Image (spheres, rainbow, N blue to C red):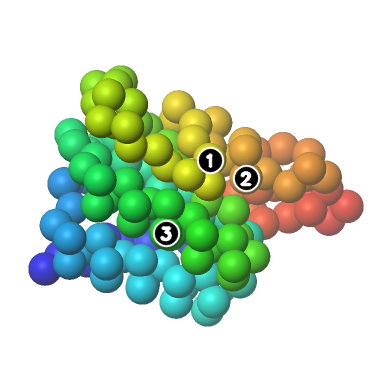
Amino acid sequence: MDAVPILKLGSTLLVSIQVDLQDQTALQLQEDLAERITQTGARGVLIDISGLEIVDSFIGRMLSSIAGISRVLDATTVVVGMRPAVAITMVELGLSLDGVKTALDVEKGLRMLQPADATSPEALLLGLDADRA
């Protein structure tokens, strides 16, 4: 089982899922991400799913669960890069990502996670507040 890498960019954790997840890998990602949020004090989690061809009901529930766990740990989750075909299939199947914020791409997702008082995307990447930027 391959672990999904979790990168830290300032106060944000970036997860880029480039292969379709097996159930066990998704469960491990949930545990690893909760641990990293706790270790780093991250305020944001950005999950890039642009590499996924399919988001089934289990993966959809896992994304919702990750967002819920992150919220309890004082971090906001944004899922980015959903392909149009994936979005259409999810709606047709009645699947929803309750409590999960979404954005079209990584750049827009990072903007959503940017603190209201930060002055630039660079401040977000460096984890700086506006008064320290």
Q: Nearer the viewer, residue 23 or 43?
A: 23
Tag nearer the camera, 3 or 2? 3
Tag nearer the camera, 1 or 3? 3
The picture places residue 28, in percent across and down from the top left corner, at 27, 70
Q: Residues within 10 Å of mark 1 (few under 14, many from 20)?
A: some
Give the quadrant of residue 120.
Answer: top right
Task: Look at mark 3 in the image and give the residue it sits on.
Answer: 65
Q: Earlier in the sequence, mark 1 or mark 3?
A: 3
The picture places residue 108, in percent across and down from the top left corner, at 54, 31
Tag nearer the camera, 1 or 2? 1
Helix, strand or loop under label 3: helix
Q: Residues within 10 Å of mark 2 (few under 14, many from 20)?
A: many
Query: Does the CB distance between marks 3 and 2 fall below 8 Å?
Result: no
Helix, strand or loop under label 2: helix
Of all residues, the one furthest to the front in this rendering is 94
Task: Look at mark 1 in the image and give the residue it sits on.
Answer: 101
Q: Nearer the viewer, residue 54 or 105?
A: 54
Q: Residue at x 42, y 59 (%)?
A: 65
Q: Give the amino acid type for the residue marked by disc 3 in the picture.
A: Ser
Of all residues, the one furthest to the left in this rendering is 1
Q: Nearer the viewer, residue 118 or 71?
A: 71
Q: Is residue 113 left or right of residue 133?
A: left
The picture places residue 42, in percent across and down from the top left corner, at 58, 65
Q: Nearer the viewer, residue 101 or 11?
A: 101
What whole-number distance in Å separates the C-alpha atoms at marks 1 and 2? 10 Å
Task: Look at mark 2 in the image and give the residue it sits on.
Answer: 113
Q: Quadrant of the N terminus?
A: bottom left
Of all residues, the one furthest to the right in this rendering is 131
What whole-number distance in Å separates the C-alpha atoms at marks 1 and 3? 13 Å
Q: Earlier in the sequence, mark 3 or mark 2?
A: 3
